[in-house]
Amino acid sequence: MKKHKLLLFDQISRRMRGKLLWLGLILLVLAVVDLVRPFLGSTFYLLWLVVGLVALLWVYYAILLRRAGLFIAPNYLLLRAPLRDVKISYGRIATVTSTQMSQHFTLKELKARERSLVKPMFGATCTFVGLNSWPKALQNQRTLWFPRLLFGVRREGLLLVTPNWMTLNRDIEEARSKWHDARQQKNKKDGRSLAAKILEL
């Protein structure tokens, strides 16, 4: 499978992992100092709990988030988030075009955190994969597992900002074309009537 890095996930990872690393180191130093010269009293364990929580968050943003991306397989696109994978059949894809995030969102309608996140890529050309319908896994829980900026709001589809949108478009179209050709060949080889195919089920 070919992997295409999604810059939205990459940007989130870069913004958070450095902050969490510094916060974790500061808290760890305080925890170690408390072991040598106690100053927290009976609440010392709370600091160690926070250190553990920050460490888990760092693993999420620095390691798990960087495994996210779009993978092109022979029969489907695989949209991977840190904790969730979704397969999108080529049969669901209506169009693959170039666009910009600014054509789907305005800066005014974005939250302050979202604006600062997408500003570096807001005017860049990206890929829009228009869908005939959402996979079941994305119908009602898109924003639970994925950033909402990954989805078009004026049309149903995926808004994919990658290092090279032309390569992504070409790879998707090639895989999609091969998938359609394979299905046509399969249908041609099976020359039985519809009734015969149904009886076999």
Image (cartoon, grey):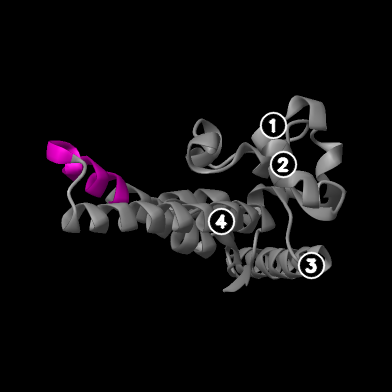
Q: Which mark is residue 112?
A: 1
How far is mark 3 from mark 4, CA to CA? 19 Å
The residue tagged with tag 4: helix, strand or loop?
Answer: helix
Q: Which residue is drawn at 79% across and 70% down?
A: 167
Which sits earlier in the primary sequence, circle 2 or circle 4?
Answer: 4
Above or below, comparing residue 27 to residue 156 in the picture: below
The prevailing secondary structure element of the residues shown in magenta is helix
**Amino acid type, callout 1:** Ala
Q: Earlier in the sequence, mark 3 or mark 2?
A: 2
| Label drawn at residue 13 | 4
User: Decide: marks 4, 1 in contact (CB < 8 A)?
Assistant: no
Spot occupied by residue 161 in the image (x, y as percentages of width and height): 74, 55
| Local secondary structure at mark 1 | helix
Compute the Cα span from label 3 to label 2.
22 Å
Which residue in the structure is indicated by mark 2?
A: 116
Q: x, y percentage for residue 113? A: 65, 36
- Give neighbour class at mark 3: few <14, some 14-19, many 20+ (Cα, 10 Å): few
Residue 182 horizontal side relative to residue 194, left or right: right
User: Which residue has dot 3 on it?
Assistant: 164
Q: How crowded is mark 4: few (under 14 residues within 10 Å), some or many (20 or more)?
A: some
Q: Which of marks 3 and 2 is in front?
A: 2
Q: Name the residue type under label 2.
A: Ser
Task: Specify the quadrant that holds the N terminus.
Answer: bottom right
Three-letter code, disc 4 = Ser
Observer able to see residue 158: no
**Mark-to-mark CA distance, 4 and 1:** 17 Å
- The answer to the question of whether label 2 and label 1 lie on touching residues, with beta carbons closer than 8 A, is yes
Marks 3/1: CA distance? 27 Å
Identity, as a three-letter code, of the amino acid under mark 3: Asn
The image quarter in which residue 106 lies: top right
